[in-house]
């Protein structure tokens, strides 16, 4: 990725040179399509892998959110674990959304809807939110993202966020409780990352 380009850019400047890689998702070997200009475009990153391995299975039904979907590893995992649920894969990066759609189709995940944030209807609430949030875009942008989405948890919904300890996982947990009034529990700490569990009460 060229200097100055970021995976949080709506339209990456680098060429969309598609490649296929083999990854393990939900206990399955899956071949997916990736490209430069999206987060972790050539592998399944450690933090996302930790989230997928350590978080309990999602609810079997309802609306599930992959916030910041990249090329779709979380969305594909949610879709496979809960085929009767509706999985929303949300990103501002057009290339990431295209890759997620490609990968969902190839994997037979017909319950995945990959869209930009404004395309999610306002009345949708989420039984689960899974996210490896883009901490490196800076606190104001991350906070704005969480302010928008975490309050949309259903009354019994649960969010799981994976965040690097060195990039402020503990301070982010305190901020969520202080600013949004949502309880946060640190459920796993491994490899320099925390998994935070956020609930409505």
Image (cartoon, helix red, strand yellow):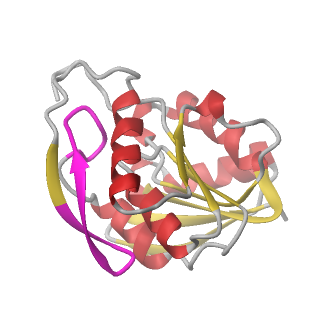
Magenta stretch encompasses residue 146: no
Residues shaded magenta: 22-41
Residue 135 visible? The answer is yes
Residue at 38% x, 70% y is 50
In the displayed structure, 125 sits above or below 29; it is above
Q: Judge by depth and name the residue closer to the eye, 115 or 161.
A: 115
Q: Quadrant of residue 186?
A: bottom right
Q: Position of residue 119 (x, y in %)?
A: 64, 31
Image quadrant where one finds the N terminus: top left
Q: Nearer the viewer, residue 169 or 81?
A: 81
Residue that appears at 40% across and 64% down: 193
State left or right for residue 74 relative to residue 191. right
The quadrant in which residue 4 appears is: top left
Would residue 25 be found to the left or right of residue 144 on screen? left
- Give the left or right position of residue 37, taking residue 56 as reference: left
Vertical arrangement, residue 76 with respect to residue 95, above or below: below
Give the percent coordinates (x, y) of residue 28. 31, 78
Q: In this view of the protein, can residue 70 be seen by the observer? A: no
Give the quarter of the figure containing the C terminus: bottom right
Q: In the displayed structure, would residue 182 be above or below residue 24?
A: above
């Amino acid at each position: 990725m060229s200097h100055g380009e970021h995976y949080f850019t709506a339209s990456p400047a680098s060429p969309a040179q598609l490649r296929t890689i083999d990854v393990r998702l939900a206990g399955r070997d899956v071949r997916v399509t990736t490209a430069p200009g999206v987060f972790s475009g050539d592998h399944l990153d450690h933090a996302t892998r930790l989230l997928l391995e350590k978080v309990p299975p999602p609810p079997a039904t309802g609306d599930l959110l992959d916030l910041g979907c990249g090329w779709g590893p979380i969305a594909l995992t949610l879709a496979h674990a809960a085929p009767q649920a509706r999985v929303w894969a949300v990103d501002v990066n057009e290339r990431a959304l295209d890759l997620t759609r490609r990968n969902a189709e190839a994997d037979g995940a017909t319950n995945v809807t990959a869209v930009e944030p404004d395309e999610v209807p306002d009345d949708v609430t989420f039984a689960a939110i899974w996210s490896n949030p883009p901490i490196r875009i800076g606190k104001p942008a991350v906070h704005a993202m969480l302010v928008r989405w975490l309050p949309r948890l259903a009354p019994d919904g649960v969010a799981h966020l994976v965040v690097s300890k060195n990039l402020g996982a503990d301070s982010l947990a305190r901020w969520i409780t202080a600013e949004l009034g949502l309880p946060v529990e640190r459920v796993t700490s491994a490899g320099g990352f925390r998994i935070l569990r956020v609930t409505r009460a």
